[in-house]
Amino acid sequence: MFELIFCSLLTVLPDYLIRRYGQGKRIGYEITLYSVWYELRYGIVTCLMLTVSLITLIFYYHPTATSAVSAFRTVPILPEGIGRVEETFVPLGLESEVKAGDKLFTLDSSRQEADVVTAKQRIAEVQGEIALAQGELSVATAQVEQAEALLKQAQDELDTKQELYDRNANVVSERDLEKLQNTVAARQGSLKAAQANQALVETKINVSLPASLDSAEAQLEEAEVELEKMTLYAGFDGTVSQFTLRPGDIVNPMMRPAGVLIPEDAQNEKILAGFGQIEAQVIKPGMVAEAFCAAVPFKVIPLVISEVQTQIASGQVSTGSQLFDTNQAVKPASITTILLPLYEGGLEELPPGANCIVNAYTSNHDRLTSGEPLGTGQFIFLHAVDTVGLVHAMLLRIQALLFPVQHLVLSGH
């Protein structure tokens, strides 16, 4: 309507003034309801053409996104396994503020506590085996010393008999020498067996039992970790929303989360807006934008487009049991953009999740002032594009002014 009124001032009104004062035709006489088309045909046709052109120019170079939302991140509160709630630490309510490290709830940990006790008993058992092996090592060392002493005694006797035999063969018989030689060999075998037993006990003490102890300690650490998992803590500062969990409830990470945790630093940060695909060549990062949100009436929020998603969601193909059919993408998806406040704290009053209407404005100021050689027509066109953005900004402010009246009075709610 605003565009039509503006264009009529440039077309219909001059045509009427020419007819009235140049040709002397008067409304109600020569210009009637039946002859107005013939009399003002040039102004009316030009007005319609100019209006359509102006509306097209405004909405193409200064697009509007009606599907915009103040986005925020949520983190589901989920344990790593299924369990029954034993105790909760968050009060019942829609929202509760928590700090990083605060307890949220605990699950029944009877099995995990039993695993911890079992792991501790296993450590005590291995430590007992180590103490027992120390005693076995003492016995094996004594056996080695005993075998060495017996071997030395037998060797001394053999050496003595051998010396006597060498001096006088009639004093010692060969049979006695053979017996002593066999005794020495047997004592050497006993010594080797004792030494092998000693080495075995030392290996048990130095290698086998420490490995068993390390394994038992690792099992204890694993059991303690599993026990700690039965208590859920807040990983960061934020707000627990709609926490209705109570003792006795079953929590399943696949089917039933315990609630939602909204990080403190993930709110009032950005607005997500979806523009039509026809604006794909116009929407660029760095464009200035404005938003009107129902949650903060009578206020227009200045924004800037920080990111533009290059992919359009309706064309995505994912692995599945059926082939992708283009007829399934009936509704054209929009171009997703992220908008940040132009000034610090610009979104502080906006509740997270609020719906908004966003206008983005094309600016050719840098191009016009860069010294780039432009033709006269192009120079005028770029100035016209920047100028008509004022119309869209006025329309957004009119919407902001009229929205409370339309919603509270004229909607009939």
Image: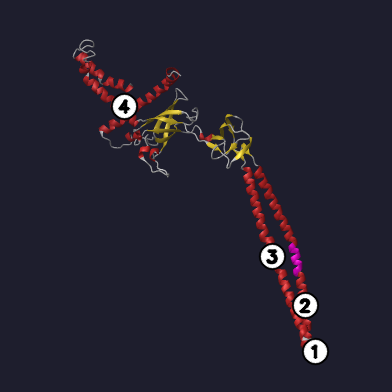
Q: Residues within 10 Å of mark 3 (few under 14, many from 20)?
A: some
Answer few, some or many: residues within 10 Å of disc 2's Cα (few below 14, many 20 plus, some between 14 and 19): many
Q: In front here: 261 or 116?
A: 116
Dot 1 corresponds to which residue?
Answer: 170
Count the marks: 4
- The location of residue 61, given as percent across then percent down, is 34, 31
Find disc 4 in the rendering and name its residue: 55
* Residue depth check, mark 2 versus mark 4: number of the one nearer the observer: 2
Sequence-wise, which precedes: disc 4 or disc 3? Answer: 4
Amino acid type shown at disc 1 = Asn
Q: Is residue 375 above or below residue 167?
A: above
Segment colored magenta: 136-144
- Residue 254 part of the magenta-drawn span: no
Mark 4 or mark 2, which is nearer the start of the sequence? Answer: 4
In the rendered view, tell whether residue 403 sits above or below residue 146: above
Residue 239 x %, y %: 56, 33
Secondary structure under tag 1 reads loop
**Under tag 2, what secondary structure?**
helix
Q: Which mark is residue 200?
A: 3
Q: Which mark is residue 331?
A: none
